[in-house]
Image: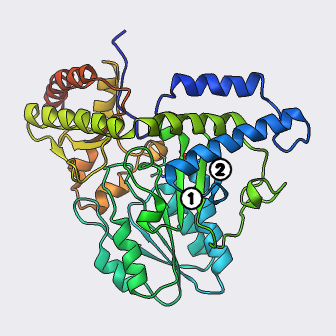
Amino acid sequence: MPKEIYLDNSATTKPYEEVVSEMVKMLTKNYGNPSSLHKKGIDAEREIKKSRETIAKALNIKTNELFFTSGGTEANNIAIRGVALANKRRGNHLITSVIEHPSVLNTFAYLEKEGFNVSYIKVDKNGIIDLEQLKQEIREDTILVSIMHVNNEVGSIQPIKEVRQMIDFRKSQAILHVDAIQSFGKIIFTPKELGVDLLSISAHKLHGPKGVGALFVRKGILIEPIIYGGSQELNMRSGTENVPGIVGFGKAVELTFADLPNIIAKMNKLKDNLRKGIVEKIENAFVNGQADSQSAPHILNISFPGIRAEVLLHALESEGIFVSTGAACSSNKPSPSHVLSEMGIDSKCIEGAIRFSVSSFNSEEDIEHCIQQLPVIVKQLKKYVRR
Ligand SMILES: Cc1ncc(COP(=O)(O)O)c(C=O)c1O
C-alpha cells in the first residue's frame, strides 16, 4: 500500500486527535442532555458554553450572536430562508452570485419558486464577482445579499468589504450574509471588519467533526426560524444540541486559532510548491483562477486538457494520492463544474480540472511525492487518449 497523501482538504479535513478524544469524553462520560435540570445536563451545558466562548472569541463576536447548527448547509439555509421570511414585508428582491455552493444556490432556487425575485452576480475569469453589476442590481426592495467569502472550487476570495460599501453607497437596508465555510481558519478576518450581518461556518473544514456548524447573527438582525421545536439555541435552531460535535468544533477552533498565522503560512507554501512543480513539469497544465497570494491558501485548481479528471483522480488514488474533480458535495452528479463554466473556462479544460487542497497536516514530502507522480501518470493517460 502506498503512503496516504490526502489533498482533498476542501471537501473535509482529518480531525485533530484532541478533537476526537474530547468527543469520546462527551459520548462516554458527559452524555447528558443540556436541557436537563440535573447535574448531567448542567455539565453538558457548561461544555457547550465553553465552545461557544472559544468560537465567539475567534470571530470577535458576542456569545449570544453565535448559533450552533447541523453544519454549513443548515447555517446557509437558516440565514437565507430566515431573512427572506422575516423581511418579506420590506421587499421581495434577493442577490447572490453564480458561483455559490449548492447549499446557497438551491436555497435561492427554492425561494424563487416561492415568489422571490433573485439576481445572480456574474464573475470574471478569476472567479471574482462583478461589483459594477452588484451596484446596478441593488434596489429599494433588496432585502438580502449573500456572497461567499472563499470559493470552494478555485479558492477565489470575494471582495466582501467592497460589497458592504456598495450596499451602504446605495443607501440600502439589505442584510449581508457571507458563507465563510472555506475561509474560517484559512484567512484572518472578523465579521465586524468585513461589515457582515450573518456568517456561516462549518467544523469539518478545520479539523473538527462533520455535522456541526454555526451561524453568526449580528445583534438586531431579524431571522425567522426554519426548524420548530424545543426552542434550543435561543429558538434559532430547535433540537437537542449535538454536544460531542459542538465540543469537537470548539476544540478544533481553539487549536487552529492558537497557531493561525503559522498554519496559513504553511498552507501557502505547500500550495505554492505544488503549483510551481506541476506547471513546470507538465506541459499544458494550467491554473484556473488566481493561485497566488490573491487566493485562499489551501485551494489549487488545475486543468490537464485532454485528460478526463475522473480518470486522473482514480489513477492518483492508486498511488495513495486523494484529490477531487471539483466540489465533493456535488460530485455525485457528474455535471460540469458551474464555477469553472461561469469563469469562462472552455469545456475541454473543465473536463480535465482537478482540485488539490492542502492543510497544515500535509508535509513538504507529500507535495514532493505528488509532483513526482503526476507527470508520470499524466504521460501514461495521454498516451492512452491518443490511441
Ligand atoms: C463554500 C461551502 N459552503 C457550504 C458547504 C456545506 O457545508 P457542510 O458540509 O458543513 O454542510 C461547503 C462544504 O463543502 C462549502 O465548501
Q: How is the image coloured?
A: rainbow
For label 2, the crowd category at 10 Å Cα-Cα, with few meaning under 14, some 14 to 19 and many 20 or more, is many
Residue at the spot 63% in from the left edge and 41% down from the top edge? 51
Check residue 69 in the rendering and tell me which mark sits there, or answer none.
2
Q: Is residue 209 visible?
A: no
Residue sitting nearer the eye, 262 or 104: 262
| Type of the residue with mark 1 | Asn
Check residue 339 in the rendering and tell me which mark sits there, or answer none.
none
Check residue 76 in the rendering and tell me which mark sits there, or answer none.
1
The answer to which quarter of the image holds residue 280 is: top left
Q: Secondary structure at mark 2?
A: strand
Q: Residue furthest right?
A: 38
* Residue 315 rendering spot, x and y as whole percentages: 29, 24
Residue sitting nearer the eye, 202 or 328: 202
Q: Secondary structure at mark 1?
A: helix
On the rendered structure, is 329 left or right of 157? Answer: right
Q: Quadrant of the N terminus?
A: top left
Residue at the spot 59% in from the left edge and 39% down from the top edge? 250
* Residue 233 rendering spot, x and y as whole percentages: 74, 54
Q: Residue furthest top?
A: 1
For label 1, the crowd category at 10 Å Cα-Cα, with few meaning under 14, some 14 to 19 and many 20 or more, is many
Q: Is residue 254 visible?
A: yes
Determine if the C-beta at disc 1 is less than 8 A from ligand 1. Answer: yes
* Residue 229 rendering spot, x and y as whole percentages: 83, 56
The answer to which quarter of the image holds residue 358 is: top left
* Residue 83 rendering spot, x and y as whole percentages: 62, 72
Q: Earlier in the sequence, mark 2 or mark 1?
A: 2
| Type of the residue with mark 2 | Thr
Determine contact: label 2, label 1, CB under 8 Å: no
On the rendered structure, is 296 left or right of 97? Answer: left
Residue 304's place in the image compared with 98, above or below, is above
Rounded to the nearest angstrom, the CA distance separating label 2 from label 1 is 10 Å
